[in-house]
Image (cartoon, rainbow, N blue to C red):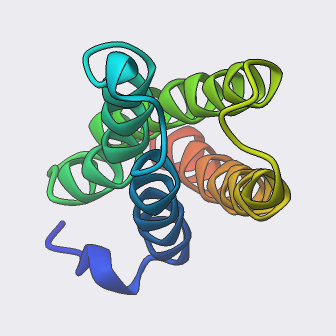
C-alpha cells in the first residue's frame, strides 16, 4: 500500500494522545513506574504504532486487523485514565486526556469503517 502514516488523521490524534499520556504520567507516584505508568504508556504507544504498521501492509484486510488492535489499545488507555483518576493520580489533566482519547476513538472508528467498506467492496 505504501501509505504515509503521518498523514493519517487517526495516527496524528493517537500520537498527540501518546505525548499527552507521557507528560501526564511523569507525575505518577514512583511506585507505579512498573505498574500503571508502564501499562498506560504501553497501551497509548500501541495505538499510533499499530496504525503506522498496518498502513504498510499490502492488503486492506491486514490493515484492518492492525486498526482493530489499535482500537483495543485505545480502550485500555480509556480504562487506565479512569483508574488513575480514581486513585487520585490525575485531576486537571484528566479532562484533556479523556477528550483526546475520545477524539482519537471517533476518528479511528471512521477509518475502520472506511477500510472495512473497502475490504467488503474489493473482497481483499
For the point 43% across and 57% down, which residue is it?
18
Is residue 23 left or right of 63 when viewed as pictured? right
Residue 56 in the image, given as x and y percentages of width and height = 15, 58
Q: Residue at x 25, y 59 (%)?
A: 52
Q: Is residue 3 above or below residue 36?
A: below
Outermost residue, bottom direction?
7
- Quarter of the view holding residue 103: bottom right
Can the viewer see residue 124?
Answer: no
Most foreground residue, 19 or 45: 19
Q: Nearer the viewer, residue 110 or 120?
A: 110
Quarter of the image where one finds residue 31:
top left
Q: Position of residue 109 (x, y in %)?
A: 71, 48
The residue shown at (57%, 48%) is 121
In which quarter of the view is residue 1 placed? bottom left
Q: Position of residue 101 (x, y in %)?
A: 69, 52
Q: Relative to 29, say whether 57 is above or below.
A: below
- Nearest the viewer among 89 and 58 is 89
**Is residue 55 visible from the viewing direction of this image?**
yes
Q: How many marks?
A: 0
**Which corner quadrant holds the C terminus?**
top left
In the image, what residue occupies the spot 30% across and 82% down? 6
Amino acid at each position: 500500500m505504501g501509505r504515509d502514516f503521518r498523514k493519517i488523521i487517526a495516527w496524528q490524534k493517537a500520537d498527540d494522545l501518546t505525548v499527552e499520556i507521557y507528560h501526564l504520567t511523569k507525575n505518577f507516584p514512583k511506585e507505579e513506574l512498573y505498574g500503571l505508568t508502564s501499562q498506560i504508556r504501553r497501551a497509548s504507544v500501541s495505538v499510533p504504532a499499530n496504525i503506522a504498521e498496518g498502513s504498510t501492509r499490502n492488503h486492506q484486510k491486514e490493515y484492518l486487523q492492525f486498526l482493530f488492535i489499535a482500537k483495543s489499545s485505545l480502550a485500555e488507555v480509556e480504562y487506565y485514565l479512569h483508574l488513575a483518576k480514581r486513585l487520585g493520580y490525575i485531576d486537571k489533566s484528566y479532562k484533556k486526556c479523556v477528550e483526546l482519547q475520545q477524539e482519537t476513538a471517533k476518528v479511528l472508528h471512521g477509518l475502520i469503517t472506511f477500510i472495512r467498506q473497502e475490504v467488503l467492496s474489493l473482497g481483499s
